[in-house]
Image (tube, rainbow, N blue to C red):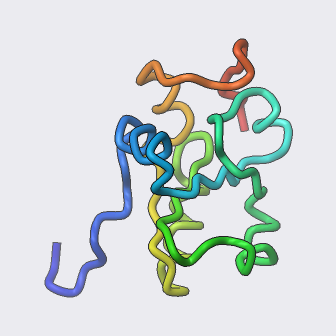
Amino acid sequence: MGAFSDPPSDLEPDRVAELLHQGEVELIDVREPYEHEAGHIRGARHIPLERLASEADTLPRDRPLVFQCRLGARSAMATRAFRSAGYDAYNLDGGLAAWDEAGLPLEPADGYVADH
């Protein structure tokens, strides 16, 4: 990591769960509607990636944003874009798949990680 590198932007699922439970972050699910309906994290705000730029002004600047998708690639793009725009933004490392693998809950009760 060089002297001019950004601070780490990936957060592990357990850390995101803790921050979300404490109300310290805004979790943004950037997946497609069918993916969100199959299974999602309680408390996540759903804004599909293609609508994210047009809804940016509705996102808080007074607390960190955590973006999530299925595996972390789409949400990493969102994280970089929002960081470059001055937001305190992070990526759920490994996405919803890592969240699920960590044994963290999905909604609905029979929710699952849909293929993209």
Q: Residue at x 53, y 63 (%)?
A: 65
- Describe residue 18's horizontal placement relative to residue 29 as left or right: left
- Along the viewing direction, whichever of 65 and 97 lies nearer the viewer: 65
Residue furthest to the top in view is: 110
- Along the viewing direction, whichever of 63 and 89 lies nearer the viewer: 63
Q: Is residue 60 above or below residue 57?
A: above
Which image quadrant is residue 111 in? Answer: top right
Q: Residue at x 45, y 73 (%)?
A: 88
- Describe residue 3's horizontal placement relative to residue 95 as left or right: left
Residue 30, percent across and down? 69, 54
Residue 1, percent across and down? 16, 72
- Describe residue 32's horizontal placement relative to residue 7 as left or right: right
Which image quadrant is residue 13 in? Answer: top left
Residue 81, percent across and down? 56, 77
Q: Residue at x 53, y 31 (%)?
A: 97
Residue 14, percent across and down? 37, 35
Q: Is residue 50 above or below residue 41?
A: below
